[in-house]
């Protein structure tokens, strides 16, 4: 037997031994969950896993993943209960019908998966820290969006109510209380959110069970495994910046489902929102899942608490589409979690190097470099082998463009939501998404428009330097504080905040030069007509906005900044380290835009500008060149 196969066999038996040891350890514990049954003490160690009384009724059960087979770990390892009695009521005491919610995970999933539970508890998907912090900041309840919060611990301030009624559905602490598969409507569910899978037979058995008044017990159990698909991500990540729907190519509209006639250009999702097709991400077109890029190391977090999403994300496009040499590791260097994933997915490239992420060095076990030095990715959906191409020589060839993120050039489009007016209606019935109950009084959002276009350019400044990233309208909104009785602010607040964003609408082809250098929306002025007018020996840029002027700040409804003027707003972004282009940067971009009026992207002069920058070329311009006057 090859050495690599022996290693896998060894890991398999070690893993089984760990499961058995944890199971016996768990049986030795007091498994009480419900206070009403706190007098029940069960010595689980006295009952072998495959001799539990559960099997007296729940016979011929199938559907389990191999490592969660009850013949190996029993039923009580996940569901708790009393395995020493054949009495139905007694055996079901302390039982958890749907294990894996974070409320019970410490006594269920977490008894074996201790490290994973710790990581999830600190994950932003559980705490929603950044979401809470930004919302409380714009409501004037904190002095910065960079404070740490946990959405499960918020109170009843105006911002807290806003979160409870509009945002608090999407966090892993939300309980899954009903049987059934994860769908587009699912939110939360702890471990179930990603790892619960129902086969067609399991769903059919569940239907028969419920229709028989719970008398015909299911024979096929849902599986808990690592085979995460995009539906697991959809419920939460189709909201806010709409990453899931963007990835599929669909942009949300304000249309009603009854208004949709063209079924090819529009799609109605399960929650009855209507979407227009704008173009899918190239990775989605290839059949790749979210987890093909965002592996367990990133999705479950690393155990550290982060303020914002971009801090927790480790993966970068260049980790796969590298420029010179990739960062790699070998099979022998894989951490225990990666070894388990490797084994669960039956990978066979133990003898080949795999890619690793530069930022935190975690491995991408579904990649490898072959004997011809070609890099491949194995799709987690179907095992299909995909050739990973190196970064093009055209990428970041000059000093001016090295600061651009990959998404700045390769994103096809991004959603643009503008004109959101928030009022508290104290006599309108609302629903507390955190406590799952109806209430009187609720915040209501009145949205003006959902649109989509090429994203704007944002500047992120950090200890690593300056980078240019895509940005979308994050909060172009008003808040009527006087409508909420607990508001400390008075009157109406208006914010024009853009948010740095990774649209997940990647295209192989890049946007052309003019789409940045001569495009009003890209620079931050909003959609409209940006034209270069030459009068004798003088050039002038003129801008005519598409949207009306907002009287609150004198800017077009969708704009981020004034046209070639400093912004008067004190707050411009949902992040303290992200800002729009300043006037000097705008002028430099439009200077190149004026050259593009005559010289095409592939002209000799523009290709030379990519290599040397624009300044050397300004020393040898012809008399025919009319440069802009920014005075």
Image: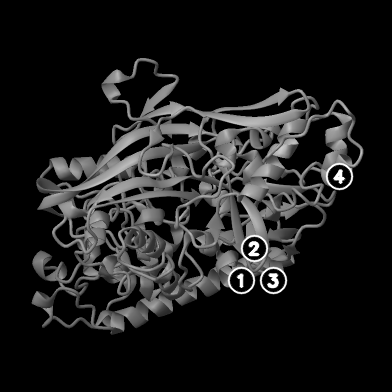
State left or right for residue 504 relative to residue 180.
right
Q: Which quarter of the rendering shows the N terminus?
A: bottom right
Give the secondary structure at mark 3. Answer: helix
Q: Image quarter for residue 574?
A: bottom left
Residue 363, label in figure: 2
Using the rendered image of the protein, determine whether residue 592 is visible from the camera's viewpoint: yes
Tell me which residue sits at (48%, 76%) in the image: 17
Of residues 547 and 554, the one drawn nearer to the viewer in this rendering: 554
Between the residue at mark 3 and the residue at mark 2, the CA separation in whole angstroms equals 9 Å
- Disc 4 crowd rating (10 Å Cα; few below 14, some 14-19, many 20+) is some
Crowding near the residue tagged with mark 3, few <14, some 14–19, many ≥20 C-alpha atoms within 10 Å: few
Q: Which one is in front in this view, the residue at disc 2 or the one at disc 1?
A: 2
Residue at the spot of label 1: 335
User: Which circle's residue, 4 or 1, is located before the other in the chain?
Assistant: 1
Q: Position of residue 37 (x, y in %)?
A: 11, 76
Q: Is residue 536 above or below residue 502?
A: above
Do residues under tags 3 and 2 come within 8 Å of each other at their CB atoms? yes
Q: Are marks 2 and 1 in contact (CB under 8 Å)?
A: yes
Q: Earlier in the sequence, mark 3 or mark 4?
A: 3
User: Looking at the picture, does residue 616 appear above or below residue 413?
Assistant: below
Count of labels in the image = 4
Name the residue carrying label 4.
611
Q: Element type at marker 2? A: strand
Q: Give SS at disc 4.
A: helix
Among numbered discs 4 and 2, the one appearing first in the sequence: 2
Disc 4 to disc 1: CB gap under 8 Å: no
- State how far apart marks 2 and 1 are (Cα): 8 Å
């Amino acid at each position: 037997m090859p050495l690599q196969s022996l290693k896998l066999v060894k890991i398999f038996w070690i893993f089984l031994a760990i499961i058995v040891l944890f199971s016996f350890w768990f049986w030795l514990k007091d498994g009480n969950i419900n206070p009403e049954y706190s007098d029940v003490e069960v010595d689980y160690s006295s009952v072998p896993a495959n001799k539990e009384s559960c099997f007296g009724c729940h016979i011929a059960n199938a559907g389990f993943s191999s490592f969660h087979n009850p013949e190996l770990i029993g039923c009580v390892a996940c569901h708790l209960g009393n395995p020493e009695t054949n009495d139905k009521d007694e055996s079901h005491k302390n039982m958890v019908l749907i294990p894996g919610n974070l409320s019970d995970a410490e006594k269920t999933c977490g008894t074996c998966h201790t490290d994973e539970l710790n990581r999830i508890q600190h994950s932003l998907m559980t705490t929603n820290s950044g979401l809470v912090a930004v919302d409380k900041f714009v409501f004037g309840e904190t002095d910065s969006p960079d404070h740490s919060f946990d959405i499960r611990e918020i109170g009843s301030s105006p911002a807290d109510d806003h979160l409870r009624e509009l945002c608090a559905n999407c966090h892993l602490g939300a309980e899954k209380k009903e049987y059934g598969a994860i769908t587009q409507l699912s939110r939360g569910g702890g471990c179930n959110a990603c790892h619960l899978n129902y086969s067609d037979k399991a769903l059919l058995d569940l239907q028969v069970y419920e229709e028989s008044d719970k008398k015909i017990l299911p024979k096929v159990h849902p599986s808990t495994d690592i085979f995460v698909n995009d539906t697991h991500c959809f419920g939460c990540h189709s909201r806010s910046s709409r990453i899931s729907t963007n990835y599929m190519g669909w942009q949300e509209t304000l249309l009603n489902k009854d208004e949709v006639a063209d079924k090819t250009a529009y799609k109605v999702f399960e929650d009855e929102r209507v979407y227009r097709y704008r173009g899918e991400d190239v990775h989605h077109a290839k059949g790749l899942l979210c987890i093909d890029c965002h592996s367990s190391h990133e999705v479950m977090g690393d155990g550290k608490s982060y303020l914002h999403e971009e801090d927790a994300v480790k993966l970068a496009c260049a980790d796969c589409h590298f420029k010179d040499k990739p960062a790699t590791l070998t099979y022998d260097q894989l951490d225990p979690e990666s070894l388990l994933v490797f084994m669960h997915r039956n990978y066979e490239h133990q003898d080949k190097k795999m890619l690793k992420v530069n930022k935190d060095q975690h491995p991408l076990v579904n990649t490898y470099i072959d004997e011809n030095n070609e890099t491949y990715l194995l799709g987690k959906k179907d095992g299909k082998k995909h050739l990973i191409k190196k970064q093009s020589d055209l990428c970041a060839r000059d000093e001016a463009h090295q600061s651009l993120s990959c998404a700045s050039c390769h994103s096809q489009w991004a959603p643009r939501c503008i004109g959101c007016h928030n009022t508290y209606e104290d006599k309108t019935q609302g629903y507390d998404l955190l406590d799952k109950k109806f209430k009187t009084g609720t915040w209501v959002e009145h949205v003006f428009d959902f649109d989509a276009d090429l994203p704007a350019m944002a500047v992120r400044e950090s200890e690593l330097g300056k980078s240019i990233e895509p940005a979308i309208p994050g909060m172009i909104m008003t808040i009527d504080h006087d409508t909420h009785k607990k508001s400390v602010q008075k009157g109406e607040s208006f914010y024009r905040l853009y948010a740095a964003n990774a649209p997940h609408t990647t295209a192989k082809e890049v946007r052309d030069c003019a789409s940045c250098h001569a495009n009003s929306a890209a620079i931050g002025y909003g959609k409209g007509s940006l034209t270069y007018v030459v009068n004798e020996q003088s050039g002038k840029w003129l801008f005519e906005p598409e949207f009306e002027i907002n009287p609150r700040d004198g800017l077009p409804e969708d704009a981020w900044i004034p046209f070639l003027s400093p912004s008067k707003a004190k707050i411009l972004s949902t992040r303290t380290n992200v800002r729009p282009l300043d006037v000097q940067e705008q002028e430099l971009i439009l200077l190149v835009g004026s050259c593009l009026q005559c010289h095409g992207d592939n002209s000799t002069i523009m290709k030379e500008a990519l290599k040397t920058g624009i300044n050397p070329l300004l020393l040898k311009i012809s008399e025919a060149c009319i440069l802009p006057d920014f005075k």
